[in-house]
Image: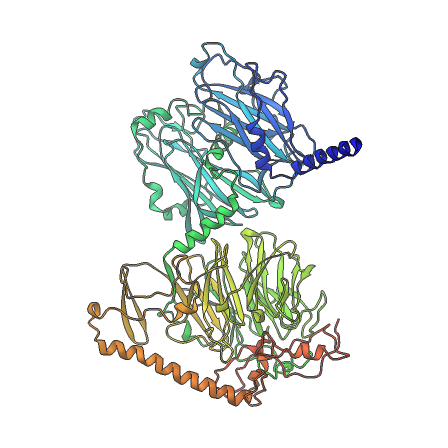
Amino acid sequence: MAGFVSNLLILLLLFQNICLGFRRPLSVFKSYKDTSISLSSECLGSNQRVISFGLSDFALDIRMPAVTPKQSDTYLCMSVRLPVDDEAYVVDFKPHASMDTVHHMLLFGCNEPSSTENYWDCDEGTCKDKSNILYAWARNAPPTRLPKGVGFRVGGETGSRYFVLQVHYGDVSAFRDKHKDCSGVTLHLTHQKQPLIAGMYLMMSVNTVIPPGKKVVDADIACHYKRSPMHLFAYRVHTHRLGKVVSGYRVRNGQWTLIGRQSPQLPQAFYPVKYPVDISYDDILAARCVFSGEGRTTETHIGGTANDEMCNFYIMYYMEAKHAVSYMTCTQNTNPEMFRNIPQEANIPIPVKSDVLKTMHGHHEEAKDSDTSSLLQQNKKEEEKILDQETKDSDASYLLQQAKKEEAEILDQDFHIEEAVEWPGLDLKLGQVSGLALDPENNLVVFHRGDRVWDENSFDSKFVYQQRGLGPIEQNTIIVLNPSNAELLHSTGKSLFYLPHGLSVDKNGNYWVTDVALHQVFKLGANDKEPLLILGVPLQPGSDKNHFCQPTDVAVDPITGSIYVSDGYCNSRIIQFSPNGLYVMQWGEETSMGRPRPGQFCIPHSLALIPDLGQLCVADRENGRIQCFRLETGEFTREIKHKAFGRELFAVSYVPGGLLFAVNGMPYPGEVESVQGFVMNFSTGEIIDNFIPLRKSFEMPHDIVASEDRTVFVGDVHAKAVWKFVSVGNMEHRSVKKAGIEVQETKESETIVEARLKNNQESRDPLKNVDKQHLVQQASSTGVSFVLITTLLIIPVVVLLVILVFIRWRKTTVYGGNSDGERKLDSSSGRILGRLRGKGSGGINLGNFFASHKGYSRKGFDRLSTEGSDQEKDEDDGTDSEEECSASPLPPAPSSS
């Protein structure tokens, strides 16, 4: 019995130790901090430097070895080797310092310290090789807490093997008693891989000269960003005494977005970026320092002493681990002319009280940097110092907070998308508009079909194009328009395409298009008459690596150049190709019976790249939803689906900053979901606005594209038109013309019901808002009589009753009163064919019906619902010439390669 109890106790102890290894790193580190050893006057003495807690986590104590600085402004350094050889991640810091004795501490990572001594004067340098700042602490700064999932990578093949601690002792009067100092920091490290890697971006002017007595001197810095996306979450400004204000911006397509703005005479801490800012490939990072030379009698140059100046803007960011760069700098101004458009706020000094100035200028100037290289290194250190102060969210998930902040920001923004009624795009002479995109200059690019239409005679049962004898379209199918006035700027694409469909434009201005008749994808230069790249075999549908079957859209990753193709009407997959067109991988499968599962498609119709998050979102048309996947792996990440979408969702577009735009399809007979546009918060998936045209109704919106200023374009394949919508803010007054009636909207009016979701207490159902746009205004404020208001309210009710009676009559006529909802084909137009999809109780999926019979195979091309399900004509239009649809159902096709 005693042996049994003994064995049981041993098992329990082992189990406890194993569980400890899998506890959350921050909680484990808290436990360690709460029980940390109180160091003696000789600091480290016999105390243990490395403390292990759990299978994957350990703490590393880095302390000054009982030093006594002899004079003020002394910089002392010491080094500690990383106790493991394999890769680890620093995920938390605990400082040990007193602001009475230490001005600031900096922790570097490198592979070869400048000295092998126990400690040394930092005038000798910190590291012999390249060093990266990992941590900084300053007087009155709280401890650094990195966001959950974010860490500094050390060790392994590429990470630093040594830590070098630099301590700046400002005023040494506190050492009159000759006591020993053991300031330092305890690191929490883990072997668990972190998905996000932290880093620093330093913007610094190196050649600014401030003339004596000159009141205002600007120092401007700007660089093009040429790396993988990074997400900014903290900033810090730094100058010496002459600096008045420092501001940093992201510039994208001419739009300036504030990263941060602060007086350098205030505590030079890291401050949180107010709204999340992402930096993508080819964005411009810009910063301005405003100085005053008043009170100086000689020129002031950039340098490391108190009489010199500095112009530094530090940015703290995180990146996905596979693309991570730990440190980047910008020391030039690549586009001086650009600063003519800098926001005026960048030139307005921030007033600072005199007592704050007196406190700040005790020791804060860097005094040890004699050349540009060491200056750069010192700035890295100082910047990391403020990093700790910025991350005030402790061990809470910073990434979750970022998403919540983004959601709150968007929901709090008082805007509504409305049609730009002066836009002349509705009057353009176009064919069926199938694709839209914006080029690098923000011009609108339209892909249309000229005199060609997609109808029930276009394809046979094997999806082979039947109108090859017509030859390619003789009109220019790609046109470029001025987004302001629809002026034609450029056109191309003549005699190249048979049946255009999807369009996108890459960062270099190349056009990427799909042709559903040719079953191909093309890359064209803006001024080239011949394609630069062709994927697929002309006029041959297929499902292997070299063939497509009616591909719908294409997207190009601006970072990697990878090509993504949605394929398509008769395949249910997304295919990735290398930048030069080599097959990489594919994912997706056909939707099975019942509720569609993640990764299943029923016509993947439109693509939207979210490069800053490494995701690809797909408009899964016939499943009425948006699915998002990881770019590198094709792994499913999320689904966005709303009742307001109805059964079809045609197109999706993403705008950096977190907005997702989409358009749905026409409702089925008897359904109430209207055809409309949607604005969604990408981080939450919630609908925050919806929009419809004012002048002319949507007929079959086929594609959508939006710009960062929330200008939205919608292309309608049936109406052969392009709508423009703009963001309308919360103005004191604005005039909205609708149905010939002008209604004056007032900011504080209680009688205007806007189609906008302003807070979480309002209904999230956009259907309830569609009919609420600009309804009535108080009779007392407009002089409208009671009779007129009553009439305006009665007319819609009467019209609604007439429509309901008509729908009831049509259902009885078309469906023959079948109680099970089975639909019969309308031989005059063939339009009901596209409704046989079996998505719910109201329809039948003929593919599944035939699949239940012996001898039928799904391998190949068995989808019946193609573009034909998008009715290219009005309900009462009896013509067939404008219908975009699939071929009539023929006997099942054999398997194809």
Is residue 463 at least partly visible in the picture?
Answer: no
Q: Is residue 405 above or below residue 889?
A: above
Q: Is residue 760 above or below residue 522?
A: above
Q: In the image, 835: left or right of 486?
A: right
Report x, y in % for residue 452.
55, 80
Indicate the quadrant containing the C terminus: top left, top right, bottom left or bottom right: bottom right
Q: Is residue 280 above or below residue 67?
A: below
Q: In the image, 136: left or right of 631?
A: left
Instruction: Give the residue furthest to the top.
Output: 177
Indicate the quadrant containing the N terminus: top left, top right, bottom left or bottom right: top right
- Indicate the quadrant where residue 895 lies: bottom right
- Indicate the quadrant where residue 319 lies: top right
In the foreground, 541 or 145: 145
Instruction: Give the residue furthest to the front.
Output: 1
Report x, y in % for residue 727.
38, 61
In the foreground, 294 or 323: 323
In the foreground, 579 or 798: 798
Is residue 540 at least partly visible in the picture?
Answer: yes
Report x, y in % for residue 172.
45, 15
Q: In the image, 648: left or right of 5?
A: left
- Indicate the quadrant where residue 88 lies: top right
